[in-house]
Amino acid sequence: MRYFLDTEFYEDGKTIEPLSIGIVAEDGREFYQEYPMPEKTISSWVIKNVCMKLEQRSIPKHIIAENIIDFIGNDKHPEFWADYAAYDWIVLCQTFGTMMRLLRNFPMFCMDVQQFRAEQCIDEFPSELDSTNEHHALADAHECKRRFDWLEDLDK
């Protein structure tokens, strides 16, 4: 099954600190959780555009990892997709400690809808696929799924 992923995070050029994670399963199930706030000074842009949308219900990282495992369930071959996937994949892997601590059935990589778009020689996505709640991890995970579905429909 495909899982569409988005994260919100703070980065300072040295580290990536997760703020929230959203996952939408291909079957429509949703997962959303927030990490504890980092003990660093967060930029005003992140405060204005991301933190203001957080629900302030943080959960320890190891519990989020357990909850992701429960959400994925017994899926023997989960396929993860994200929009500009690099940092989202790092946040997911760091939730488990390191990439080497991912479950055996998890892939060691994440697919990227931007690469899928570029392979189809499409310059940009139609604006109607854009999230109305940009920088909220669950809303952006839904946007990722909409974009994937649109590209997949073109491919048929």
Image (cartoon, grey):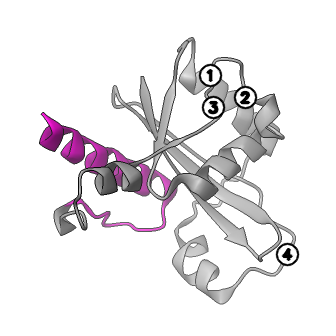
Chain part drawn in magenta: 129-156
Q: Earlier in the sequence, mark 4 or mark 2?
A: 4
Q: Which residue bears the numbered disc 3? A: 68
Between 137 and 84, the residue placed more toward the observer is 84
Label at residue 40: 4
Between 127 and 108, the residue placed more toward the observer is 108
Residue 133 screen position, x and y as percent? 37, 66
> Label 1 amino acid?
Asp
Q: Residue at x 81, y 32 (%)?
A: 100
Label at residue 70: 1
Q: CA distance from mark 4 to mark 1?
A: 30 Å
In the picture, which quadrant includes the C terminus? top left
Q: Are marks 3 and 2 in contact (CB under 8 Å)?
A: yes
Q: CA distance from mark 1 to mark 2?
A: 6 Å
Q: CA distance from mark 3 to mark 1?
A: 5 Å
Residue 102 screen position, x and y as percent? 74, 29
